[in-house]
Amino acid sequence: MRTGSTGKDRQRGFLWWLSGLAIVLVTAATAGLYIVQPPGGSVAADTTPEVSTSPQPPAPAPSPSAASPLTTPAPQPTFPPDQIDSQWPKNPPWDACPAPVWPGTPGTGTPGDGRRVLILGDSLTRDSQEPMTKYLAESGWTPTFRCWGSKRLDWGLDQIKRAKKLDQLPEYVIVALGTNDISWEQPATTERRVNTMLDRLGPDRQVLWVDLDIAYSTFSMERADWFNKMIRQVAKDRPNLRVVPWEKIARQENAARFDGIHYGTSGYRLRARELTQALDERARKLSPASPTPSPEIS
């Protein structure tokens, strides 16, 4: 009787174990888990996410316009070297400017925007070249100076011819000649040379002509007054010509002079600034995209 009872107990225990295992399997299946039997005999749940095996669409190709870290950088702009007029003396005399330079690198800034300007003049231009170069650079101009002390309009005509031969005659030209003509040339000759120069520059080129400020002698002052009236009369028939009223500016600002014609450092700095401003105003007036300028000097 003792042995039979033990066998039945074992049988009941085995049945209880089977029913517990069934409950665990059903619960695991309901939860969506996979039951694995590790080597040690214990049961563990594999919670690794299921990976879909259905076909996936191919990844889109990268856009041609998309920047790539391996893209070759765009080449930097290059400029030709500066060109120096070979016919100018290598060692200019004391009263001449250095050899004219046609810069290879344009200026930056506005309203010049890198455009070129030729400045043609005598000793007044020579002595104001340094500050004027600075002011022009600040306004974005690319200047070339052709200046020589005591020169007259016939020399200026030769410079226009030379610049044109070198293809160095830009859209904007500042002329500051006439001081040395009024005392040594007849008025008719001076007026004819003024018109010849303007004809050679052409109607499509913007010309700013600086009038004369003379306080040397009665004769010179009368001739300067005649010249200033003449150049304004000429400008009435030439829309591309503007007269810079340097005489009026110099008198109003009391520009210091030492011989009735030439100025000191402050006077040349004033002249350089006023000529640059006149050029800036002209450029703004001709450019629709520029801000509304102040009233133009006339």
Image (spheres, helix red, strand yellow):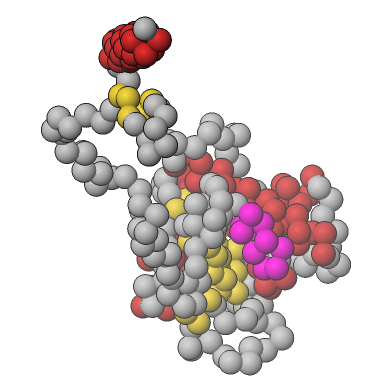
Q: Is residue 130 magenta?
A: yes
In percent of width and height, residue 295 lies at 59, 34
Report the magenta residues as a range.
129-138
The residue at the far front in this view is 1
**Residue 62 found in image quarter:** top left
Q: In the image, 132: left or right of 257?
A: left
In percent of width and height, residue 122 lies at 63, 72
Q: Is residue 65 above or below residue 53?
A: below
Q: Is residue 93 above or below residue 137?
A: below
Q: Is residue 191 visible?
A: no
Q: Quadrant of the C terminus?
A: top right
In percent of width and height, residue 240 lies at 43, 49
- The residue closer to the viewer here, 121 or 294, is 294
Q: Residue at x 45, y 53 (%)?
A: 206
- The residue closer to the viewer here, 250 or 68, is 68
**Residue 200 found in image quarter:** bottom left
Q: Is residue 23 above or below residue 56?
A: above
Q: Quadrant of the N terminus?
A: top left
Would you say the magenta stretch is mainly helix, strand or loop?
helix
The residue at the far left in this view is 55
Q: Residue at x 54, y 31 (%)?
A: 292
Q: Is residue 227 magenta?
A: no
